[in-house]
Amino acid sequence: MATLTITRADFFASIQDLGRRRTQHLGLAQSGVADEYSFFRANYLVGNEVVTPVIEIITGLFSITTDSPVTMALTGADMSARVNNAPLPPWQSFVLMPGKVLELQYSGGAGIYGYLAVKGGFDIPLCFNSASTVERENLGGYHGRKLAAGDTLTTIMERPLCPTLATPANQIPQFDRPLTLRIMPGYDHDNFPENSKELLFSSEYTVSDKVDRTGIRLSGPPVNWDRGDILSKPVALGVVQITNDGTPVVLLKERQSTGGYPMLGVVSHLDLFRLVQAFPSTPVRFSPADPVRLRNELLRFYNFWGFS
C-alpha cells in the first residue's frame, strides 16, 4: 500500500468512477466521471480494471505526494503537469517516488477535466455500488465531499509498479476544437415548431460560462417552445432541455432526476465526452442523427474497453 497526501486542491477535485446505476428513482444523481474516454484511458495506462475509481480534477491547481513508489497516469485536460518542477507529459504512465510532488497547473483552455489514476486504485468505500462523489448529496468519495489539502488516500496495490505506457498521438483528443453534437429526438421533439428545430440545427452556439457537473448552458439564438408548461419527466444523460427563455441546456452526470423543461433531443454520449471538456466560447453546432447508429457506436466504445 501507499499513502497519498493532497497538498493542494484549490478548485474541485473528487473521487469518481462510472457513477450510480438504477438509483434515479431514489432521487439520487447518476454522478460519475464527466469524460469516460479519458477515465478509461487513465486506468488502462496503469493496468487497472477500467472502471477503477480515479481522482477527477477540474481545471487544475492540484498537487499530491506519496510515501511509497506508485504508478500513476494523467489524462484528460492538459494541466501542465510537473514533478518537482520537471515537465511531465500527459497521457502516459509514470512512477511518483517518495519525496516528489506531482503538481498540476491551470488547464487554461486545453480541457476542463483531468483524470489521475493510481495503480491498484484507492481504498474508498462504495455507496450504492459506486465510489463517486456527489457533494450536494454528501454522498460517496472522500467522506461525501471534494478533496482538500491535507487529505490522505490509501492505495490498494497488487503490483506497485508496471511498465510505462504511452497513448498514441492519434488517440489523444484535442479539446480546443469547435464541436458538432449529434442528437437523437427527445421526448418533446415532435411538439416543437418546425422553424424552432430548423433554427437549432442551422445556428452556431457557444459554450457559456454557466457550466458545472449538472449541465452546460449554450449561448445563441433562442429556440421557441409555444405549448406552455409541461409535466416533469425523467431526464437522461445528454438531454437537451429548452428553458423558458429559449436557451438550450445539455444535462450531465449530476443532473436532477426529473425535469419540467421540454426536451428537444439527446446528445450522443461520445460527443458529450468532448463537450464537457470545452471551455466557454467554444463554438457548438447540432446535427440530427440516427438513434440506432449512435447506439451501435456507443456499444462498440464500451466493448472496446471491455465494459458493458
Image: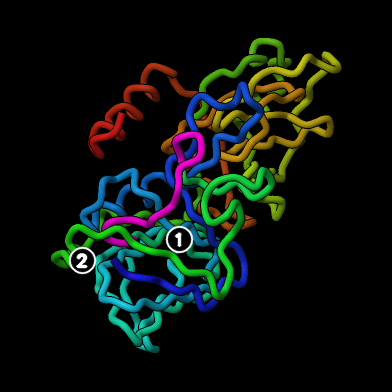
Q: Position of residue 71 (x, y in %)?
A: 25, 68
Q: In the rendered structure, which amino acid carries the disc numbered 2?
A: Pro
Residue at (71%, 51%) from the top-left corner?
Answer: 210
Q: Compared to 2, does 210 lie above or below?
A: above
On the question of residue 54 being in view, the answer is yes
Write down the residue under mark 2.
160
Q: Compared to 22, does 121 lie above or below?
A: below
Q: Magenta stretch?
A: 118-130
The local crowd at label 1, few if under 14, some if 14 to 19, many if 20 or more residues have their Cα within 10 Å, is: many
Q: In the rendered structure, which amino acid carries the disc numbered 1?
A: Gly
**Pick the front one: 199 or 186:** 186
Residue 162 left/right relative to 108: left
Q: Provide the major secondary structure of the magenta segment.
A: loop
SS for dot 2: loop
Q: Position of residue 199 (x, y in %)?
A: 68, 29
**Pick the front one: 294 or 98:** 98
Numbered tag placed on residue 84 in the rendering: none
Residue positioned most to the top = 190
On the question of residue 274 being in view, the answer is no
Residue at (60%, 45%) from the top-left corner?
Answer: 139
Circle 2 or circle 1, nearest the eye: 2
Q: Quadrant of the N terminus?
A: bottom left
Q: Compared to 282, does 25 lie above or below?
A: above
Numbered tag placed on residue 114 in the rendering: 1
> Is-magenta flag for residue 92?
no
Residue 17 left/right relative to 190: left
Q: Earlier in the sequence, mark 2 or mark 1?
A: 1
Separation of marks 2 and 1 at Cα, in angstroms:
22 Å
Q: Quadrant of the C terminus?
A: top left
**Pick the front one: 67 or 47:** 67
Q: Position of residue 102 (x, y in %)?
A: 40, 78
